C-alpha cells in the first residue's frame, strides 16, 4: 500500500482550490486501481482505450482478452487474423498498432523491470517509437503500472476538464495553462491528476 498522506498534505498547502476538491473526494485510492500484467498487456490495453469511452473500451478489451484464454503473447497477437480482431471491436488502425506493438515486443523492448530503472522521460522516448503509442499512452503506463508520482498528462481531456471545473474557467485550459498550474503540484503531479479525474464525479 502506498502512503499518500505527505503528498496530499503538500498539495493542499500548495493549492487550496485543489485542496478543497481533495477534501470532497476523500482518501486517494490510486494504488487500488493499478493495472496488472506485463508491458504487452499494459500497452495493448492503453491502445484499445484510446479515444473511446471507458465503457466501450472496457467491453472491447474484455472481448480481446477472451481471444487469448491460454495467455496473451506477442506471437499469439501476430497470429490472430485481422478479421478476428475486427470482430471483437478493434478498428483497422488499432489492429495495426497492436500488431506493431507485438512485433516490437518480439524484437526486444525493455521489460517492465528494466523500465523501472529509467527516468520518466527516457521511458516516454523509448516507448513512443512504437506506432500508436504517444506520450499520453506512456503516461498512463507510468501512472497505473509503474507507480510514478510526478506525472501530469497535459493532453488528457479529463485533466483539462477537471482543471476547468476546479478553477471555474470559462473554457478548457490549454497546455501552457495546465503546465503553469502543475508547477504547484510537483513532485506529486500524479496524485493531483488522480484528484482532478475524481473531481468530475462530484455531483
Image (cartoon, rainbow, N blue to C red):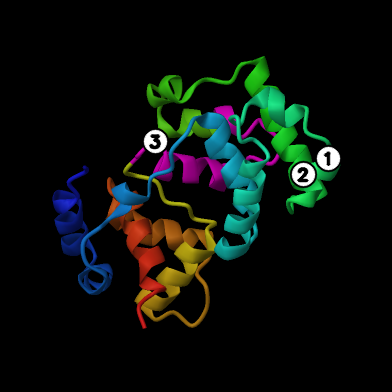
| Left or right: residue 22 compared with residue 47 | left
Q: Look at discs 2 and 3 and give the one toward the viewer.
A: 2
**Residue 189 versus residue 35: which sits nearer the camera?**
35
Q: Secondary structure at mark 3?
A: loop
- The crowd level at tag 3 (other Cα within 10 Å; few <14, some 14-19, many 20+) is some
Verify CB contact (< 8 Å) between mark 1 and mark 2. Answer: yes
| Left or right: residue 104 compared with residue 42 | right
Q: Which residues are magenta?
A: 126-148
Q: Secondary structure at mark 1?
A: helix
- The crowd level at tag 1 (other Cα within 10 Å; few <14, some 14-19, many 20+) is some
Q: Which residue is identified by label 2?
A: 85
Q: Residue 132 placed where, x, y %?
A: 69, 41
| Left or right: residue 71 compared with residue 160 | right
**Residue 66 versus residue 160: which sits nearer the camera?**
66
Residue at (78, 33) in percent of width and height:
80
Q: Residue furthest front?
A: 69
Q: Residue 56 placed where, x, y %?
A: 63, 62
Q: Residue furthest top?
A: 107
Residue 82, numbered circle: 1
Q: Which residue is identified by label 3?
A: 146
Amino acid at each position: 500500500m502506498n502512503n499518500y498522506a505527505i503528498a496530499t498534505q503538500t498539495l493542499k498547502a500548495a493549492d487550496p482550490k485543489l485542496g478543497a476538491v481533495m477534501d470532497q473526494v476523500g482518501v486517494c485510492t490510486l494504488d487500488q486501481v493499478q493495472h496488472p500484467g506485463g508491458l504487452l498487456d499494459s500497452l495493448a490495453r492503453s491502445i484499445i482505450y484510446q479515444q473511446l469511452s471507458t465503457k466501450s473500451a472496457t467491453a472491447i478489451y474484455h472481448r480481446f482478452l477472451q481471444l487469448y484464454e491460454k495467455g496473451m503473447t506477442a506471437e499469439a497477437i501476430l497470429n490472430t487474423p485481422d478479421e478476428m480482431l475486427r470482430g471483437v471491436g478493434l478498428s483497422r488502425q488499432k489492429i495495426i498498432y497492436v500488431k506493431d506493438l507485438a512485433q516490437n515486443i518480439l524484437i526486444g523492448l525493455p521489460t517492465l523491470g528494466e523500465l523501472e530503472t529509467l527516468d520518466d522521460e527516457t521511458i516516454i522516448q523509448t516507448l513512443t517509437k512504437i506506432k500508436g503509442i504517444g506520450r499520453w499512452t506512456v503516461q498512463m503506463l507510468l501512472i497505473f503500472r509503474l507507480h510514478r508520482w510526478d506525472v501530469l498528462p497535459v493532453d488528457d481531456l479529463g485533466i483539462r476538464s477537471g482543471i476547468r471545473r476546479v478553477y471555474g474557467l470559462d473554457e478548457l485550459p490549454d497546455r501552457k495553462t495546465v503546465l503553469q498550474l502543475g508547477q504547484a503540484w510537483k513532485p506529486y503531479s500524479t496524485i493531483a491528476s488522480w484528484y482532478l479525474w475524481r473531481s468530475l464525479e462530484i455531483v
